[in-house]
Image: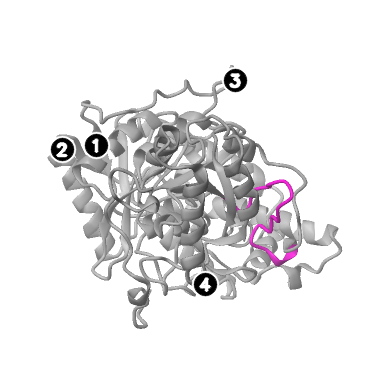
Amino acid sequence: MQPETCLPLHDVDASAQAALIQSGQISATELLEASIAQIEASNAQLNAIVTPMFEQARQQARGKLIPGPFSGVPYAIKDLVDVQGVRRSSGSRLLSSHVSDSDAAIVSQTRAAGLILLGKTNTPEFALNATTEAVLSGPARNPWNRAHSAGGSSGGAAVAVASGMLAFAHACDGGGSIRIPASCCGLFGLKPSRGRMQGSGMGDSGVEHCLSRSVRDSARLFAWNQRHDADAPWPAIRLPVSASQHRLKIAFALNGMAGTAPTEVVGTAVTATARLCAALGHHVETVQLPVNGELFFRHFKWAWSHSAQRAFDMAREMGKDPEQELEAWTNYLAAHARAAAPEAAGLATAYFSRVAQDFAGFFEDYDVLLSPVTSMPAPRLGYFDTGLPGEVLWERLQHYAAYTPMHNIAGTPAMSVPLGMSHEGLPIGSQFAARAGDEQTLFELAFELEQAQAWSHLRPPPPEYKISPAASP
């Protein structure tokens, strides 16, 4: 049975899917089979789902559904996260046969929301890249053009949602890994504040949430997963149901942290977003980002490489050769960590604290900061190949991700909103950030932008038109 809108089930957002199940217009089994059919039709081309969980999902859909905001709706978990009895590779050959013995906290919370897990999504090795092209599982291909990156590290999740396999999917973000795939694939993606969500603390730069087509799906899942405990750093937000009438003071920064400009097409798209905000009555003021890019990336590289060093050490503990089991990029970062001076950790921690203080001061003068998400649209697959010389790949990543990781370090919430498109048909997101703990303002603005320039009807072209001739990134 099709919904009243006469749209295919995979074109209906998760909130509408849940309502259809609750009203009896469709069953959870019908909805699940529609998602599985979509995966079976396109996953071989797009490589979004790396570990199917179809039989487990079917058993759950046939049984008594768990009551929750998304009861009976299909969902997928990023392959960095443990699901009991299911492989968790973290995109690495090192863990290609690892099976988790318990559910991660986010998985338990996901099940409690009534969601039905049907698989795990593609990710780069240990989430250490801004594209999803792991040697183990192969590239996740952008549905808008299969020759291009889907972003990273939640690239598989973005492909699954953008291609219609799922209405939304789990994602996490330690340096842009929700916002970058959202921008590449034309989705809505919000990174919560540090410590905001259940299972996260104020010492975590990485946070978990989702990628979605609609703002309301993201907002409803956020409301479910936010912390309500006595030690929560922020009061729980109210579930936004409509755009706010409050007009905002929006700071607009076009250049990246190092002062370099984005490509012309990105600059044009994000400038158009600034004009849209002004036309809606918001005050828009051009500024420079309150971050020293050279200092930032020096310390951020230490933090990033420290994660790679943990993978290197794990390989040794398993009796494996890291040089053989880990990708060249992971080994490069681990070597950088080992070569760091003893005082590097203390210096990075102190600097990151100053970044958070600087952003707190910045948001005393502005409600929202608008910038690009990345310096260019989704590059061609291979542009961030982990077999490249480490310094080459690092330079490319610094230029590309010149807008997202500062918000992980500052702990500020930020979202990618799909408002732009290149002449070649690749989506371009606009990033909005707010003071720590103020997701309410971002959601209300997102609802307003969604009403002003709806994107839900935009879909990738048919598969036969997805690959373009060779071109520069």
* Magenta: main secondary structure: loop
Neighbourhood count class around disc 4 (C-alpha, 10 Å): few under 14, some 14–19, many 20 upward: few
Q: Look at the image and give the residue range highlighted in magenta.
A: 77-94
- In percent of width and height, residue 88 lies at 69, 55
Per the model, the C-alpha gap separating discs 2 and 3 is: 38 Å
Neighbourhood count class around disc 1 (C-alpha, 10 Å): few under 14, some 14–19, many 20 upward: some
- The residue wearing badge 1 is 448
Per the model, the C-alpha gap separating discs 2 and 4 is: 42 Å
- In percent of width and height, residue 313 lies at 78, 57
Neighbourhood count class around disc 3 (C-alpha, 10 Å): few under 14, some 14–19, many 20 upward: few
Residue lying farthest to the bottom in this orientation: 470
- The residue wearing badge 3 is 231
- The reply to whether dot 1 and dot 2 touch (C-beta < 8 Å) is yes
Q: Earlier in the sequence, mark 2 or mark 4?
A: 2
Say which residue appears at 44% left-offset and 31% top-offset: 436
Nearest-to-viewer mark from 4 and 1: 1
- The residue wearing badge 2 is 280
- The residue wearing badge 4 is 392
Q: Amino acid at mark 1?
A: Glu
Q: Earlier in the sequence, mark 1 or mark 2?
A: 2
Per the model, the C-alpha gap separating discs 1 and 3 is: 32 Å
Neighbourhood count class around disc 2 (C-alpha, 10 Å): few under 14, some 14–19, many 20 upward: some
